[in-house]
Image (tube, helix red, strand yellow):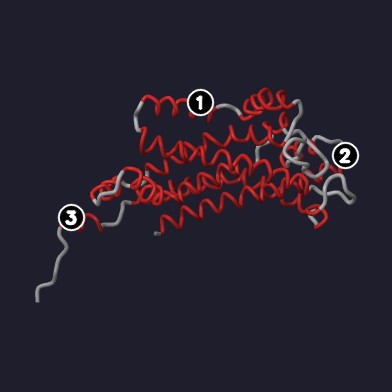
Amino acid sequence: MQSLQPNPVTREIIKPLPAGRRIFSQTVTVLAYGAIVLALLPLLSLLIQIVTAGIKQLNWNVLTRALIEEPSGFLNAILGTFLMVAIAAVISLPIGLVTAIYLSEFGKQSRLSQTIRFAVNILSAVPSIVAGVFAYAVVVIAMQTPSALAGSAALVLVMLPMVILAGEEALKLVPSQQRSASAALGANTMQTTFKVVVASALPGLTTAGLLAVARAMGETAPLIFTAQFSQDYPNGLFSTTSSLSVLIYNYANSPDTAQNELAWTASLVLAFLVLTLSVVSRFVLKNKAAR
């Protein structure tokens, strides 16, 4: 029986690589892994520092008491952060998602959509401290007092461009064949958009919202001017309200060692909240890819 012999092309493919090419390939692989390690070192060192310094004062009292109480904690800052971010999310997420849907499905390349994209791109490049100054000029001066509402207004300006840009990209990733198939079945534009496109892009839209919320939680500059700082619990939308980021800023610069340690603990809690939201957003996208 005649044995099967590989053709010349197969022989060329399975032929061992020359020693020089193997060495080059291994060198590039080592350099790539080394670059990954170098890129992760700053993040890992930061996380290690936050954990080692912040865990010293982490206890039940810190998480359940306000700064004004004895023994003191920063529950008021946690509640203030949640309050302002929640208000900003309620405003920015619907507006941002509706705008993203218009730009992706209805506006396309119209003059209005191009103007909106131009404005959103500019807003996304504006430093967050400028958003704080704008909210101060519009809200704080009009109300004659810093407040949680003013802080939320500043965070809306930070979150809105991120939601719009990420939301539009998520909608663009939906294959055009799905739109064509829906139209072929007799669905109109509105039905196709909301029952097919938005439904398919929902994990990406959810990720956009979660990442925007995570960014808002970590913002400091917009809140220094607008919400300022308070040692007591939040007292409505029209009074000064503390936040974790501003507490960290104030106490990290304090000459009091106890306040410095509390700032590290607040940093640990804030980092945990932000990283949790980031991990959840990645998990949502991973589940979408698995489907």
User: Which residue is label 1 attached to?
Assistant: 122
- Frontmost of labels 3 and 1 is 1
Classed neighbour count for the residue bearing mark 1: other residues with Cα under 10 Å, few (<14), some (14–19), many (≥20): few
x and y, in percent, of residue 90 in the image: 58, 42
Classed neighbour count for the residue bearing mark 3: other residues with Cα under 10 Å, few (<14), some (14–19), many (≥20): few
User: Which residue is label 2 attached to?
Assistant: 256
Q: Amino acid at mark 3?
A: Val
User: What's the residue at 41%, 59% (across, down)?
Assistant: 290
User: Helix, strand or loop at disc 2?
Assistant: loop
Question: Between disc 3 and disc 1, whose residue precedes?
Answer: 3
Q: Amino acid at mark 1?
A: Ile
On the question of residue 31 being in view, the answer is: yes
* Distance of label 2 from label 3 (alpha carbons): 74 Å
x and y, in percent, of residue 191 in the image: 35, 47
User: What's the residue at 72%, 23% (across, down)?
Assistant: 141
> What is the number of the mark on residue 9?
3
User: What's the residue at 81%, 52% (across, down)?
Assistant: 62
Q: Quadrant of residue 114?
A: top left
User: Helix, strand or loop at disc 3?
Assistant: helix
